[in-house]
Image (tube, rainbow, N blue to C red):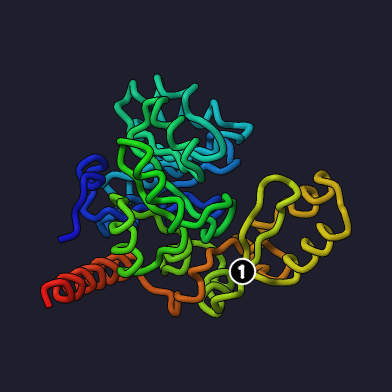
Amino acid sequence: MIKTEICDILGIKYPIIQGGMAWVSDAELAAAVSEAGGLGIIAAGNAPADWVEQEIIKAKKLTNKPFGVNIMLLSPYVDDVVDVVVKHNVRVITTGAGSPGKYMDKFKSIDAKVIPVVASVALAKRMESAGVDAVIAEGMESGGHIGELTTMALVPQVVDAVKIPVIAAGGIADGRGLVAAFALGAKGVQMGTRFVASEECTIAQAYKEAIVKAKDRDTVVTGRPTGHPVRILKNKLAREFLKLENSGATVEELEKFGEGRLRLAAREGDVVNGSVMAGQISGLIKDIKPVKDIIEGIVKEANEVLKNISGFFEG
């Protein structure tokens, strides 16, 4: 069995965490991942606190295993969302877009494990100083909002820089990726795109099929001029967005053009004009299947890879 200290810290069977993806990571997906032995995550995104509360309540009805909530610290509802997760004793909190330092006392009052997503060594160090329990080092291969460093470069540098456990994210979708993360010093992985292409994910079928159809070079990064680059699948929106960027459009114009596009793709199924956030690993994903099969397949493959590596050195 593949087990690390992350499993003990979070109370899970496998060191596999589902990414917190706005408009994607709801109670159904989170509960399915937790039931399969990983850690499911509900993404608060920019949603109001009452929606987050409903999803937490729903997840607790679907599973009695640990799950978490991802809090976007730039959300206009962040204070209320924090109060909701504390009220419902959510024991794992992942965060993005800032430092959770302001809320650490509240999180620790319910003994929650706090795990921020980081894209640099400096931020990882700052999070460790703030008293978090682990960090998710996310490379630019991932879908959605990204940093500048690749997973291969970022993870070992973060591992060397902090004493708390590091979870690798970005470009991981199978057992080989899990073993590679271990080789870089990570104690677990976070995956987003692979779980999007699952039966339990409640987004539009067209979004899932777009990922399955994608090839290795079918993602592009948009929004660099805004300071918040986003990796999405190539489509009409991507072409128009990049054209606007090259024409010298202002940050305000770009942000207005992109407003509501993720929901358009994820919930309405418009994968032509919507923002289909997905990682570079999309080209490796060839099917849509149950979460349980995804996780068990990854663990089985990882064990086989580890055996092969062991045999290589013994030989």
Instruction: Quarter of the image for the N terminus: give it.
Output: bottom left
In this rendering, position of residue 294 left or right of residue 210: left
The residue located at (67%, 71%) in the rendering is 234
In this figure, which residue is indicated by the disc labeled 1?
219
Residue 54 position in % (x across, y down): 46, 41
In this rendering, position of residue 107 left or right of residue 277: left
Mark 1 crowd level (few <14, some 14–19, many ≥20, 10 Å Cα): many
Compared to residue 214, the image places residue 112 above or below, namely above
Instruction: Quarter of the image for the C terminus: give it.
Output: bottom left
In this rendering, position of residue 179 left or right of residue 218: left
The residue located at (49%, 54%) in the rendering is 139
Residue type of the residue flagged with mark 1:
Thr
Tell me if residue 53 can be seen. Answer: no
Residue 21 position in % (x across, y down): 51, 52
Outermost left residue: 314
Q: Secondary structure at mark 1?
A: strand
In terms of depth relative to the viewer, which is nearer, 85 or 162?
162
Residue 224 position in % (x across, y down): 71, 52
The residue located at (58%, 52%) in the rendering is 148
Tell me if residue 255 can be seen. Answer: yes
Compared to residue 79, the image places residue 173 above or below, namely below
The residue located at (37%, 26%) in the rendering is 131
In terms of depth relative to the viewer, which is nearer, 109 or 148?
148
In terms of depth relative to the viewer, which is nearer, 259 or 282?
282
Residue 129: image quadrant is top left
Residue 201: image quadrant is bottom left
Residue 226 position in % (x across, y down): 74, 46
